[in-house]
RNA sequence: GCGAGAGUGGCGGAACUGGUAGACGCACUAGACUUAGGAUCUAGCCCGCUUGUCGGAUGGGGGUUCGAGUCCCCCCUCUCGCACCA
């Protein structure tokens, strides 16, 4: 228990106040959480930081939002889990090693130490006992184990394939890590390479991940839309077109089987294996080879321009009509999607339309619109892609296109040349990285046995530290014979270890589960702890992870569920990791995101030193609603600081009588009915209206800026009443003391240090244990409400009435108003309307 | 091109279900206190004028309504995402 300090300092000294409380929280482990099935839980989580060196304003904003939520829910009576850790593997550490000769492990550890001190200095209420760092073998060993389990289940596999290669980062990238054909990290143009790589079968969950988007009302629609688009489900059919003049066929994927009678040629990707075999020996062979070479050399973005293509010199047949169709290699057809080949229906697909026009190919209308003039290929300016009725389609004539899709697919199935199928844009997740600073992939290669998983009892495969960083010649791991050379777990013969490491997004796909039992060393998770704490109730982070981390985590949570890791027998399964998601905006200065390269960064250390952590917190909360970008303003910071100094002065001025006034926040004054003083009643009403607004803003709307504004209004409402001598009226005195205490309680989540310090002078007990105040509904009732009188929609008068005045009386009163009389004089009243408690509307 | 979101004072932003547009803060102006103040306090602060509890005003135009920043239609601008996905 804290005793009330004697006389408070006259001047607010943030440094002294903040370090004092931070030391106390650390010493008492105030924010350590323990599972307690008897209490309702709240798991509040912010995306954990990469230990890059120092925290930036984006971190301050992100973690302040999270801390407000965590602290407020604690006061609300929830058992709150609010952990933090370090996403500690990644390229910058390795680059530092190459450029400056510091070992990644040391660089990372030093950064973590510095940044941890910075976070503590911000006063964030983390449970520091649960801190994890993903580069710790005690962490990543479980990831290696998950991988082995996935391997057994076929959820992980190795395959040679075309992958995205960043020459600058010297590694492979996942599809999600390529933006606009460039590396997400360094923006270099990404090349294609054919490599043997490890993949996780995220596509096995494509349908579930897509469908479950509808079960996430707590996520921003924008993020769900991005995920849905990324998964990209297309329902359609695979049809095989037999080759003319030889054996075999070309399989195409289409979402419009109803238009198959309109196919006049077939387009295939330049990477398609049939391109070479079909053109070989034809007069077109040389032109085809040249075309393929040229297109494959183009970066993906440039391929997309125009409708380039070349005739292969070969034909196939439309399986429905027997028509002979020329086969083209086309730059716009993607080998990676569908079947790598498409049937071309120029009249009903815009790309095929353009291609046909460019290459002077025939066009056939097979779908006619129902409420428009019939189409004529000669006069069409663009493809008709909407629904309609089938024509020139043999037995299917007259069917609506939707019906025809099913009928034609069924016919193809019966004929043995097609089937209904669903394709996804989502590709399996390539997780091999040709870099050192990551978790080793726990497999070995044996000449006799092939790919052999490391035995579970031999985990972890620890990343060796004694390596050379030259920056050339690939991963330093591959050059470390001591690491590479091993024996085959299966036959005991000499074997070689995998030297690629995991994509660091793997570590961040399950850290939120590990926080529930970070020290567990016999198994990955304590399923009871997961059952209690998960899912995360509020997750907060940047929108940039809309399809990266957030999609991977949703996948990983499902994979771990199916591997039996996350729930005890009989307990409900954990499908979705994050119930509510808040994506906060960027911190902007001079119109651009704060970044070192732009030279517009503001260092949080400077802010803390000059104004204190509470001011930094208050500013980042108050300047904009959380989802919007926050424009940096030095003067805005001054304003936040000024408010705290002012609050300090007001409370200190009256502390001697404030502390003597009985009661805790929100209930200090007597019952409303017993209060005679109108001033006291008004202040009590303002106090409870503020409690109501702040609660609503923090819990439901997540509009922390308006919550702070409401508290400022409350302070403005009583500040001049707090003088060294108390108000003479005892009711008003009690109302003021109650308002002051309420202010401190409501501010505690936002500016915990100054709130705790002032509370120590004027409030009973320890603010950390004071519950969130309840709204007294009776205090909200107004004695008088102001009515507005509108004549023809314009405000012409106002007056006050008791809220329960009958409508007729209100109307009479409105009509009696002098200014209303002036407006209606000599006119006929056509309509009157009374909205109780708000306004009277008169139409003349 | 497709999809999503947003346009409100000098600035950041309020206005939640259609009901007094501009809360709160910044900047600015005047005054007070002061040796001084970039501290603090008080007052003013959307635009306009004929200074009236007058007129106009929420990107532009139209509509619904007693009443529209909010709902509907058309247009303009900006931001973000996807970008030949068959």
Image: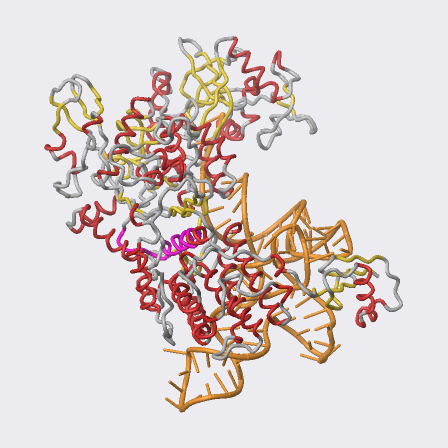
Figure check: A694 above or below A294:
below
> Residue A834's x, y, as percent?
77, 58
Query: Is residue A660 visible in the rendered structure shown here?
Result: yes
- Tell me the quarter of the picture where residue A60 sits: bottom left
In this rendering, is residue A56 above or below A141?
below
| Quadrant of image for the N terminus of chain A | bottom left
Q: Name the residue: 13% across, 33% down.
A: A483
Quadrant position of residue A200: top left
In front here: A681 or A169? A681
Judged left or right of residue A455, residue A823 is: right
Q: Residue at x 21, y 52 (%)?
A: A110
* Residue A372 drawn above or below residue A20: above
Q: Residues in magenta? A: A52-70
- Residue A190 percent location from the top left of the image: 32, 38
Q: How is the image coloured?
A: secondary structure
Q: Residue at x 58, y 58 (%)?
A: A776
The C terminus of chain A lies in quadrant: bottom right
**Where does the image place residue A189, in percent across and percent down from the top left?**
32, 41
Q: Left or right: where does residue A86 sit relative to residue A467?
A: right
């Amino acid at each position: 228990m804290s005793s009330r300090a004697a006389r408070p300092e006259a001047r607010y000294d943030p440094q002294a106040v903040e370090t004092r409380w931070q030391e106390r929280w650390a010493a008492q482990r105030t924010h350590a959480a323990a599972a307690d099935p008897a209490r309702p839980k709240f798991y509040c989580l912010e995306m954990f930081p990469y230990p890059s060196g120092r925290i930036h304003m984006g971190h301050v904003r992100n973690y302040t939002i999270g801390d407000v939520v965590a602290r407020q829910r604690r006061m609300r009576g929830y058992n709150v889990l609010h952990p933090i850790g370090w996403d500690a593997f990644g390229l910058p550490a390795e680059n530092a090693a190459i450029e400056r000769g510091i070992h990644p492990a040391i660089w990372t550890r030093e950064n973590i130490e510095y940044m941890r001190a910075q976070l503590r200095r911000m006063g964030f209420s983390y449970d520091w006992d649960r801190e994890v760092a993903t580069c710790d073998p005690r962490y990543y060993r479980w990831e290696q184990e998950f991988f082995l389990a996935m391997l057994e289940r076929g959820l992980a596999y190795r395959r040679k394939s075309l992958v995205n290669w960043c020459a600058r980062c010297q590694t492979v990238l996942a599809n999600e890590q390529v933006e606009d054909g460039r590396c997400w990290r360094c923006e270099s143009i990404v090349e294609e390479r054919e490599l043997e790589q490890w993949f996780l079968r995220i596509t096995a969950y494509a349908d579930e991940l897509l469908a479950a988007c509808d079960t996430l009302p707590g996520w921003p629609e924008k993020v769900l839309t991005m995920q849905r688009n990324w998964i990209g489900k297309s329902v359609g059919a695979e049809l095989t077109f037999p080759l003319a003049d030889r054996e075999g066929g070309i399989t195409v994927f289409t979402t419009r089987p109803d238009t198959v009678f309109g196919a006049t040629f077939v387009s295939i990707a330049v990477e398609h294996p049939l391109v070479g075999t079909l053109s070989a020996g034809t007069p077109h062979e040389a032109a085809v080879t040249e075309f393929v070479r040229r297109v494959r050399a183009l970066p993906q973005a440039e391929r997309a321009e125009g409708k380039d293509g070349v005739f292969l010199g070969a034909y196939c047949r439309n399986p429905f009509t027997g028509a002979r169709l020329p086969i083209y290699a086309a730059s716009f057809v993607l080998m990676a999607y569908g079947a790598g080949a498409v049937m071309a229906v120029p009249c009903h697909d815009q790309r095929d339309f353009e291609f046909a026009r460019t290459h002077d190919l025939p066009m056939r209308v097979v779908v006619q619109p129902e409420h428009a003039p019939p189409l004529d290929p000669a006069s069409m300016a663009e493809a008709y892609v909407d629904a309609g009725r089938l024509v020139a389609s043999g037995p299917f004539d007259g069917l609506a296109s939707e019906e025809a899709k099913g009928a034609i697919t069924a016919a193809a199935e019966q004929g043995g040349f097609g089937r209904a199928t669903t394709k996804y844009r989502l590709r399996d997740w390539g997780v091999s990285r040709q870099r050192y600073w990551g978790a080793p992939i726990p497999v070995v290669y044996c000449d006799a046995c092939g790919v052999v998983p490391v035995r579970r009892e031999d985990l972890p495969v620890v990343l060796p530290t004694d390596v050379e960083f030259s920056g050339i010649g690939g991963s330093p791991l591959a050059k470390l014979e001591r690491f590479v050379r091993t024996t085959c777990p299966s036959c005991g013969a000499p074997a070689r270890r995998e030297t690629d490491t995991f994509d660091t997004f793997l570590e961040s796909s399950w850290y939120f589960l590990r926080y529930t039992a970070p020290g567990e060393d016999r198994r990955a998770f304590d399923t009871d702890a997961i059952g209690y704490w998960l899912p995360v109730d509020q997750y907060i982070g940047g929108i940039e992870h809309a399809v990266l981390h957030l999609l991977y985590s949703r996948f990983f949570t499902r994979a771990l569920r199916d591997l039996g890791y996350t729930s005890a027998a009989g307990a409900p399964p954990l499908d979705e990791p994050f119930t509510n998601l808040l994506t906060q905006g960027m911190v902007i200065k001079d119109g651009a995101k704060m970044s070192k390269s732009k030279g517009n960064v503001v260092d949080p250390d400077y802010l803390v030193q000059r104004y204190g952590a509470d001011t930094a917190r208050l500013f980042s909360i108050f300047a904009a609603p959380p989802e919007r970008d926050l424009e940096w303003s030095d003067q805005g910071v001054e304003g936040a600081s000024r408010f705290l100094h002012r609050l300090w002065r007001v409370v200190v001025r009256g502390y001697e009588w404030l502390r003597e006034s009985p009661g805790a926040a929100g209930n200090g004054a007597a019952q409303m009915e017993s209060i005679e003083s109108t001033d006291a009643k008004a202040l009590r009403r303002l106090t409870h209206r503020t409690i109501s607004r702040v609660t609503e803003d923090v819990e439901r709307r997540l509009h922390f800026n308006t919550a702070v504004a409401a508290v400022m209004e409350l302070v403005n409402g009583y500040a001049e009443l707090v003088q060294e001598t108390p108000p003479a009226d005892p009711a008003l005195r009690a109302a003021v003391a109650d308002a002051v205490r309420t202010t401190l309680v409501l501010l505690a989540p936002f500016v915990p240090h100054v709130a705790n310090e002032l509370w120590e002078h004027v409030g009973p007990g320890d603010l950390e244990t004071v519950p969130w105040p309840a709204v007294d509904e009776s205090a909200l009732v107004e004695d008088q409400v102001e009515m507005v009188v509108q004549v023809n929609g314009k405000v012409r008068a106002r007056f006050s009435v008791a809220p329960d005045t009958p409508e007729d009386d209100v109307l009479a009163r409105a009509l009696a108003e002098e200014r209303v009389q002036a407006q209606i004089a000599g006119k006929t009243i056509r309509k009157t309307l009374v909205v109780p408690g708000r306004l009277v509307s008169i139409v003349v």
